[in-house]
Image: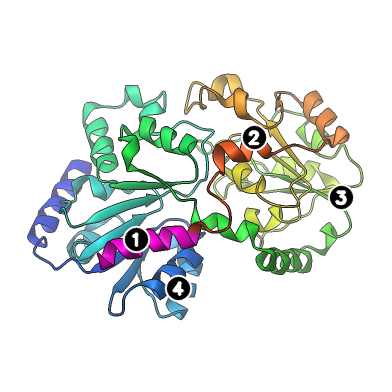
Amino acid sequence: MKEIYLWLVRLMSLMSSWHRKNQVIYLMSFGDNVPFIEALVAALPAGTKVTVFYRPQQQAAAARLAQRGIETVIFRDDLGFVFKGIPRIMRARLIFCDNYYAFLGGLRHPKQMRIVQVWHAVGAIKRFGWDDPTTVDRSASDKRRFQAVYDHFDEVVVASPAMGQVFATSYHLSPKRMQVLGYPRSDRLLDPKWLTTTRERVYREAPALAGHRVIVYAPTYREGVTFAPPAGLAAALTSDPDARVVVKLHPALVAQSPHLQQALGDQLVTAKGLSTTELLTVAETLITDYSSVAFDYSLLPNAHSLLFYLFDLSTYKLGPGVQPDLLDWLPSPALTDNDQLTAAIQQDAAVDFTQFNSHWNRANDGKATQRVVARYVALLTN
């Protein structure tokens, strides 16, 4: 079925290839780049049409864009998209993607069309693409489809040479395609006005956090929608009696771990209406594992301690795997059991993020949006 779908995409894109390339398309799986999209629209030459194709879970972000007069279209990988969406895609001079989009593997890619990857994560702890140890076991047709998508990315926006090298390795792309401009989504983390407004919202929505040390536990999504933390984790997370703990699991995992949240007792603060990023603005301690949330947290002025609780590191290395030099650049020691986590929480030592940010956040200086917009507006006007 996948091969047939891509064949239809190819056919429709060939039939629509005569369309004039004068539009901008943004493919949105994550809502963090809404300010970038707004800034891009404001800077584009008059008459340039922008359309955002969004995944259903980004309805709220799409609604905000629609309020600004930006056209939004819900996006699903179905026949409706093939026959209605592809002809619109083929009008694009410039396409931004914030994720892997399988249909690109079948799309005809005219020379005058530029496809740019603006990934949804600043850095990489997990392996992906060809670097994922499980990829070798995929079928030959799967591998062809994967590389067909990767080859469509003319440029990849990154925040550091380190992330550029990860993409070059993981996607089998030339390093020349990497653009070290910084991630637009990171600018708000360095914006005092946004930080103040966000903190006010956090304390308004979760007043129990005010006046306490806030510990956010945010483990990554695990393939297969399973999450089985070791027994005793709740006791470790609550080892500072004066702290308040917020557990932010991936939406697909929340129902899998009710026992963990129940075991935290009075120190648990539920914050269903707040995003992980919002909660990071008041967190003194972030506990995570392989999640890219660590790279965001390290930019915040309130970032005090960042703990990596890697209780399943030995098995996680087998799939999807971790970056081979992970332990060389982590800003704090890897913690592999509850005793180590308890000790680290109680010690509450400050973490020096200087080298970590130099490695991953080099171009995330609060002006990434300005640079990315300038580059691609110039591409359109020239």
- Residue behind mark 3: 266
- Residue behind mark 4: 65
Q: Which mark is residue 376?
A: 1
- The residue nearer to you, when weighing 12 against 373, is 373
- Which of the 4 image quadrants contains residue 334? top right
Within 10 Å of disc 4 (Cα), the crowding (few <14, some 14-19, many 20+) is: some
In the displayed structure image, the side of residue 336 where residue 19 appears, left or right = left
Residue 259 position, x and y percent, is 72, 41
Q: Is residue 1 visible?
A: no
Magenta stretch holds residue 370: yes
Magenta highlight range: 369-382
Residue 249 position, x and y percent, is 63, 46
Q: Nearer the viewer, mark 1 or mark 3?
A: 1
Residue type indicated by callout 3? Asp
4 or 2: tag closer to the N-terminus: 4
Q: CA distance from mark 1 to mark 2?
A: 30 Å
